[in-house]
Amino acid sequence: MNDGGALRRQGYEAVVGLEVHAELKTRTKLFCGCSTAFGAPPNTQCCPVCAGLPGGLVAGRLNRRAVELALLAGLALGCDIAGYSHMDRKHYFYPDLPRGYQLSQDGEPLCRGGYLEFAAAGVPTRVRIARVHLEEDAGKLLHTPQGAMLDCNRCGVPLIEIVTEPDLRSGAGAAAFLRELRAVLLACGISDCRMQEGSLRCDVNLSVRRIGEETLGTRTEIKNINSFAFVEKAIAYEAGRQLEELVRTGQVRQRTLRYNPAAGRTEVMRDKERAADYRFLREPDVPELCVSRATVERLRRELPELPAARRARLQTAYGMRAEDAATLTALPGLAEFFGQAAAASAYPDLVLNLLLSDLLRICPGEPFVSPVSPGQLAELADLAGEGSVNRSTAKRLLPRLAGTQESPRALAEREQLTQIRDPGRIAAWAAQAVAELPRPAADYRSGRSNALQALQGRLMALSGGRADPVQAAQALRALLETNREEEESHV
């Protein structure tokens, strides 16, 4: 199939819009008090209301925090907030929706008209947000050898749907957008965004057209993709498939698809529904939502520093690379931890290196929870920066500090891991290394400077890795240069 480059070489482009579903970080569901916790046994966190049993009406109940989180998302994305909105019934008859309709927002969403700026392959990009609306999640079908089984635990979990305009042109751009959106939602505490649990997933609307045309082509929709990599691969495959269909038949059939990651291809689920098929009607059992200006301003004050602003500040304050700043802002709590450790250290660059290269290997989960304190990391960076331990030793000490309150300096001294800087001891090791490795010593004296590496490696081994590397190299050069001068004086 064609990738984006091949598509453009044939004079076509992909036009992509996303519908992103993010489950909101609430303890209870949208219209009842059932728990939203993930991983419970099937059908243990549902009631007649969220399971859609006969007579189980929502009866005017609405989760206030879910509404506030939806509004926060709209504010973070620069949307206009509606003073008035309401819930609608969206009808479709699938087994994972026992009630037969989903409570969503059609004509009056909470938020409209925002945008998200990010870098796609290093190019500044802006994608317009058409709307952010509130809705309830559907259940989950479990396919077993005995047949399909329904788990209603997820029914009624509050989520927002973030709908973009068709501003994206590639799978890589869509994945970059989703990464930035995820960072925003995590920073604001709106969703935990655990894609492997389905709390962040997206539908891809895609069409192809000739480059330069304004009219959109016939689109297909790829449902429920929960991986950045799969989004990118699905778009690349489907764009190529559509172009082949367009060239072969002169048109693209509008369908709803799924992406099969094992086969690396999209597959037909059903013919695409149209708005009329959903038979939207206003939900009579939920009062309209009236959002005051005071509520909007209160929530605006709750917004934290957003990832883009934080990245810019980190790059300016610490001179770090853009990719390192992006890593720090991708995980909740990581940038804050770095800031505390860097402020306590004279070597913030070493703090960054130890954090990204080593500490994240120890605690790769989300949100970031460090087994060492910011003070411990700062002290460890200072030990390496001042030369009390070499960087290799600092990296080995880090897991030893996990879960303790011990001072890195005290640990290094107790374990005799501090670097030795005594010139006499280093000179003795240098002499022993030269005596043990006469060939590299002779090579160095003959002008092969890279032979010093073998001698320095032997010296470090003789010192148990504790000799100061800079002093070790200096001692070896001084000894070898002296020997060379003595040899030359005897010629």
Image (cartoon, helix red, strand yellow):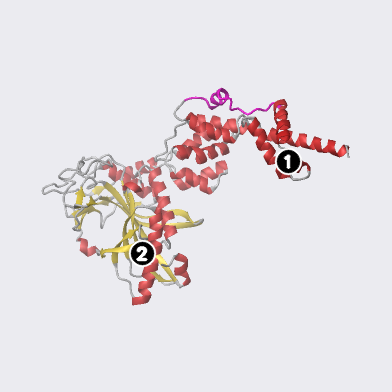
Q: Earlier in the sequence, mark 1 or mark 2?
A: 2
Question: Can residue 165 be seen?
Answer: no
Q: CA distance from mark 1 to mark 2?
A: 67 Å
Label 1 neighbour load within 10 Å: few <14, some 14-19, many 20+: some
Residue bearing the label numbered 1: 439
Q: Is residue 344 left or right of residue 262?
A: right
Image location of residue 111, percent across then percent down = 32, 52
The dot on residue 468 is: none
Q: Is residue 206 left or right of residue 60?
A: right
Q: In the rendered image of this protein, does residue 366 appear above or below residue 1?
A: above
Residue bearing the label numbered 2: 206
Toward the viewer: 390 or 462?
A: 462
Toward the viewer: 273 or 427?
A: 427
Question: Can residue 157 be seen?
Answer: yes
Image location of residue 72, percent across then percent down = 35, 45
User: Residue visible at 14% across and 47% down?
Assistant: 57
The answer to which quarter of the image holds residue 65 is: top left
Label 2 neighbour load within 10 Å: few <14, some 14-19, many 20+: many
Is-magenta flag for residue 437?
no
Image location of residue 427, percent across then percent down = 73, 29
Q: Main secondary structure of the magenta part?
A: loop
Residues rendered magenta in the picture: 405-422
Q: In the rendered image of this protein, does residue 184 appear above or below residue 461?
A: below
User: Residue visible at 32% across and 44% down?
Assistant: 69
Instruction: Give the amino acid at mark 2.
Output: Leu
